[in-house]
Amino acid sequence: MNEVIELVEDNLVEYMSDPSVIVAFTQKTCGACIKIKPKLYEIPKEHTVVIVDCDKFFRSSKLMPGGINFYPTFGLFKNGYFIKELTQKDIINQTLD
């Protein structure tokens, strides 16, 4: 099982230097966010998964290049660099690289 971290403070930046990080930018009231959350626990263990509640952690939500236009939004970061935005389909099918 991979490491899934649900932020309890506004500190996403502390995880960004990991070799491969998938960040899920979510809202607690978002139905699609709730539905896809179990899939985040199935992501291969070479990825660190960080879940950000954008209503609570405004500073962390600003780390997505281009901003967040809808929820959930997923970003793939490697060694601190943004690689690409992932779709819900990418998360479900685990087509992550």
Image (cartoon, rainbow, N blue to C red):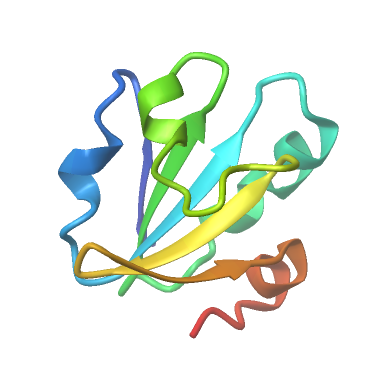
Q: Is residue 35 left or right of residue 49?
A: right
Q: Is residue 76 left or right of residue 47?
A: right
Outermost residue, front side? 66
**Residue 54 falls in image quadrant:** top right
Percent x, y for residue 18? Answer: 18, 62
Percent x, y for residue 9? Answer: 29, 18
Residue in the foreground of this view, choosing between 42 and 63: 63
The answer to whether 33 is drawn above or below residue 93 in the figure is: above
**Residue 81 falls in image quadrant:** bottom left
Residue in the foreground of this view, choosing between 20 and 79: 79
Residue in the foreground of this view, choosing between 71 and 32: 71
Q: Quadrant of the N terminus?
A: bottom left
Q: Is residue 12 left or right of residue 88?
A: left
Residue at 73% x, 62% y is: 88
The answer to whether 87 is drawn above or below residue 66 in the figure is: below
Outermost residue, top side? 56
Percent x, y for residue 12? Answer: 29, 37
Percent x, y for residue 17? Answer: 16, 59
**Residue 58 falls in image quadrant:** top left
Q: How many marks?
A: 0
The answer to whether 52 is drawn above or below residue 92 in the figure is: above
Residue at 61% x, 34% y is: 26
Residue at 33% x, 19% y is: 8
